[in-house]
Amino acid sequence: MPHSGINWLAIIVAAIIPMILGGLWYSNLLFARQWMALVGKTEEEIRKSTTNPAMMYGVTFVMCIVLAYVMDYFVHYTASKTFFQGMKIGGMLCIGMVVTTAYQSVTFEFRKTGLYLISMGYNFLCMILMGGLLAVWR
């Protein structure tokens, strides 16, 4: 099924979801302390190592747009029309493609499992919310 009638506004709004959720997920309200402990950095060290925040967030947003566009394709392809159907597509894409491939960094790069779990929880939540939004916003 060809993907026509792309709703760019829905894609851009869906791409904002990871930006907002990331701000919350990696804040002191949720996982900032655990994440910093697992990466072995203090908040001050992280601030000092961030040379160009505008570039970091800009590139991240572009990647989120790509993610939302691809997810929108799958939501259309599966004819998902309800929030739950979109969530299911987002969850399946995350589990099948993100969770599985990202685990290689734990296995071969000796990354900490706790860091992987924090990151994958964030990715899963982002992708189910993005999928849900894209399914209902036609």
Image (tube, rainbow, N blue to C red):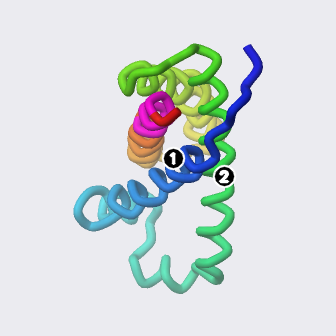
| Residue marked by disc 1 | 14
- Which x, y percent locates residue 138? 53, 33
Magenta stretch holds residue 39: no
Quadrant in the rendering for residue 59? bottom right
Magenta stretch holds residue 134: yes
Q: Please name which of the two marks, 2 or 1, marks the residue nearer to the observer.
A: 1
Seen in the picture, residue 32 relative to 138 is either above or below; the reply is below
Seen in the picture, residue 116 relative to 44 is either above or below; the reply is above
Measured Cα–Cα span from mark 2 to mark 1: 12 Å
- Which x, y percent locates residue 38? 41, 57
Which element is circle 1 on?
A: helix
The reply, left or right, for residue 38 in relation to residue 13 is: left
Q: Quadrant of the N terminus?
A: top right
Of the pair 12 and 111, the residue shown nearer to us: 12
**Count of labels in the image:** 2
Task: Return the mark for residue 112.
Answer: none
Name the chief secondary structure element in magenta. helix
Seen in the picture, residue 47 relative to 23 is either above or below; the reply is below
Q: Residue furthest left?
A: 29
Q: Residue at x 63, y 70 (%)?
A: 56
Q: Residues within 10 Å of mark 1 (few under 14, many from 20)?
A: many
Magenta span: 129-136
The reply, left or right, for residue 95 in relation to residue 59 is: left
| Residue marked by disc 2 | 63
Q: Residue furthest right?
A: 2
Residue type indicated by callout 1: Ala
Seen in the picture, residue 89 relative to 71 is either above or below; the reply is above
Q: Residue at x 37, y 61 (%)?
A: 26
Of the pair 87 and 113, the residue shown nearer to us: 87
The reply, left or right, for residue 1 in relation to residue 114 is: right
